Image (cartoon, rainbow, N blue to C red):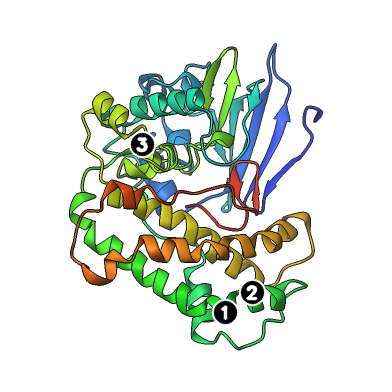
Amino acid sequence: MHQPGSFVPQLPWKTRWPLPGPGHSFFRHAEPSAGPTASAAGSCAGGRLGTPRGVVGLPPRRRRQLPLDANRRRWPAAGRFLRRVDDRYTASVFPFLAGRSHGFGPHADAMLRGSVLDMICALHKSTSVVRTCAPRHVLRFAGREDLHAFLASPDRRWESGPFAEAARRLLVPHAAALAQLVMDFDRLVESTRRVRVHLVITHGEPHPANVMAVDGRHVLIDWDTVGLAPPERDVSLIVTADNEGIERYQQATGIALSPAVITLYRLRWYLDDLGSATRMFRNAHHDTPDTRLWRDGVSGHLDRLPEWRAALAWTHTAPGRPGLQASQAGQLRPGSPAGRSGTRRIGSGRP
């Protein structure tokens, strides 16, 4: 149990402190100010709030319009829940939720999966509230430059830290497959461009670790990846490997989903982990619990490469094909990769 005012370590760019309050507790959240995303969110709040992140930047009146239990809380007065600390950091204050969180990984529990899917449906149907001011999510994966640098010179030794060379040696036998997977990602981005035109407000990471049971109901937490994106960005992390849940979503929202776009976002998540690991170990790092988790998880990630290559084989023969059979799209989904601490992937930046 952390004492009020004590430091709660999170990630290099994010820190949180529990704070005492009159009759209840708050979390103070501080993170580096960001560029376009923060500016877009700031405009959502009429430019009064420094550099907020996504839903964090919405005025309380707009928060109340989002039909999610997590937002039906008492918020500080408009303009007071977020402050610019300096040119780099912004601080915000949130009510502290006392509840039970869930473990990271796929939604194995059907009841929890259904509850989260219903919340995501409600969120997506509320897009009109924030369409003109919410930031747009950019479809890319972290660590791409470092991954490209490795693929250009896979035999060049890494001397950037205690796990650098061991990580490089794990990657070397898979260099050709990794290069092909990146090309497959680019092909899928291009072939689905026409079906990714409908954007909704997305949470970004609605996996179980970002769901808390509070007072007998579920709430979504960790809203710093919110942004306008195709609905498949959220749905890809909720529906099962057999795509169970797609019909429920489509009936609730009236939005048709593309199995190919679901595959694209699952692939982005997978490449994000591999790219993040490459970036971590190719650059200066230390022996810490987090870097050990990443080191231990690289091999398991690489073991899934043949599955991805088989599932994406269609992109080699039909590069312009916009769709994908549901059976193919559902073969792979993010599992429970190592290197994740709490609800965020370590070292990956914002997805």
Which residue type carries mark 2?
Answer: Leu
First along the sequence among labels 1 and 3 = 3
Which residue position is annotated with label 3?
Answer: 44
Observer-nearest of 135 and 90: 135
Q: Residues within 10 Å of mark 1 (few under 14, many from 20)?
A: few
User: Residue 283 occupies which quadrant of the picture?
Assistant: bottom right
The residue under the point 34% across, 28% down is: 121
Q: Is residue 262 left or right of residue 298?
A: left
The residue under the point 50% across, 81% down is: 151
Determine whether 218 is above or below 274 in the image.
Answer: above
- Quarter of the image with the N terminus is top right
Q: In 3D space, how far apart are the residues under numbered discs 3 and 2 (Cα atoms)? A: 45 Å
Q: Residues within 10 Å of mark 2 (few under 14, many from 20)?
A: some
Q: Position of residue 192 (x, y in %)?
A: 23, 56
Do the residues under discs 2 and 1 have CB atoms within 8 angstroms? Answer: yes
Q: Position of residue 276 (x, y in %)?
A: 56, 63
Front label number (1 vs 3)? 1
Q: Is residue 252 left or right of residue 86?
A: left
Determine whether 93 is above or below 139 in the image.
Answer: above
First along the sequence among labels 3 and 2 = 3
Secondary structure at badge 3 equals helix
Q: In 3D space, how far apart are the residues under numbered discs 2 and 1 (Cα atoms)? A: 7 Å
Q: Is residue 35 visible?
A: no
Which residue type carries mark 3?
Answer: Cys
User: What numbered label is drawn on residue 173?
Assistant: 1
Observer-nearest of 317 and 95: 317
